[in-house]
Image: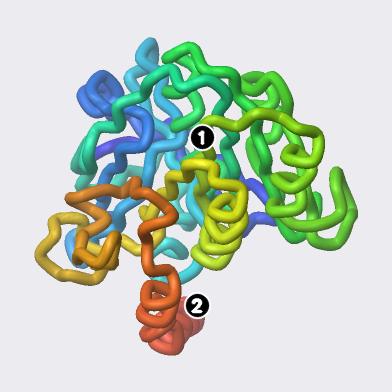
Amino acid sequence: MYSIIDRRELARGNMVSLTVNAPEIARKIRPGQFVVLRINETGERVPLTVAYKNLAHGSITIIFQVVGKSTAMLASLKTGDAIKDLVGPLGCTEHFEKVGTVVGIGGGSGIAVLHHLMEGYAAAGNNLIGIIGARDREMLILEDEMERLCSRLMVTTDDGSYGMHGLVTDAIKKLVEEQVHIDLVMAVGPLIMMRAVCEMTRLYKIPTMVSLNPIMIDATGMCGGCRVTVGNKTRFACVDGPHFDGHAVDFDELMQRNTMYQRDEKQSLLSSIKA
């Protein structure tokens, strides 16, 4: 059992941060890797990327959005409660190198994943520029944490309630227009956001990596739910990734497959609320 030592609600309550006592995982996990948890004996396996770790306290922090039955159950846990199973670290270890200027782009709960990745790029000696976006100001998370990591942080909101009015792609365009040299883009967020980022950076010929952790299911490579075509080859996000060359990912195929079970997920969430 893994005890929850801190719980916080972020972004109108549909985004939750849980800090879990897991000293062995905290000691071994690298930026970009993930864990798989099971809430109770009958719960499903839920893969979640670690936002940050605290070696002194032997803890890891996961930030997730409530989108279905399992995440709703996870969000219902309180400080002092325990998670039955927690396995990790999983996923390929990212090799962070000094490449120059890295622009990290995060949307929604993907900002939490981006934060840990940017820590890795910072440790390798890169100059960091951050771009984070949300529908409105109340949906933004980890702004202060990202600002501390980056030499420059750009915030965008769809409704213009905070920061720059527009999308994260508008912020990329602004950097290019300012003639900022960009050596690498790292994008994490909804599939539609990552696709739009990749379409733009392809025009500018900027190398771009994406994190496909949102599409993982059982995280062992056995279920095939996270399969994705990368460079005309089938890959599995959980064991071959979750990070891939964004310009080689077939986003159209991926997005079509990712919507197959939306109706079932909504029905499962509604049934759990009624119960």
- Left or right side of 227 for 162: right
Question: Residue 148: which quarter of the image?
Answer: top right
Scheme by which the image is coloured: rainbow
**What residue is shown at x 43% (from left), y 31% (from top)?**
5
Q: Name the amino acid type tagged 1.
A: Leu
Q: For this rendering, which residue is in front, 126 or 49?
A: 126
Q: Name the amino acid type tagged 2.
A: Ile
- Left or right side of 251 for 218: left
Q: For this rendering, which residue is in front, 150 or 216?
A: 150
Q: In this figure, which residue is indicated by the disc labeled 2? A: 273
Q: Secondary structure at mark 1?
A: strand
- Left or right side of 257 for 40: left
Q: In this figure, which residue is indicated by the disc labeled 1? A: 184
Q: For this rendering, which residue is in front, 251 or 92?
A: 251
**What residue is shown at x 30% (from left), y 53% (from top)?**
47
**What residue is shown at x 74% (from left), y 38% (from top)?**
175
Task: Decide which of tag 2 and tag 1 comes sooner along the chain.
Answer: 1
- Left or right side of 199 for 252: left
Mark yes or no: residue 221 visible: yes
Which of label 2 and label 1 is nearer to you?
1
Quadrant of the image containing the C terminus: bottom left
Mark yes or no: residue 15 visible: no
- Kindly identify which numbered label has been placed on residue 43: none
Q: CA distance from mark 2 to mark 1?
A: 43 Å
**What residue is shown at x 26% (from left), y 19% (from top)?**
27
Crowd rating for badge 1 (residues with CA inside 10 Å; few <14, some 14–19, many 20+): some
Residue 254, relative to residue 190: is it above or below?
below
Crowd rating for badge 2 (residues with CA inside 10 Å; few <14, some 14–19, many 20+): few
| Furthest-left residue in this view | 222
Q: What x and y, as percent, mark residue 14?
A: 61, 59
Question: Residue 202: which quarter of the image?
Answer: bottom right
- Marks counted in the figure total 2
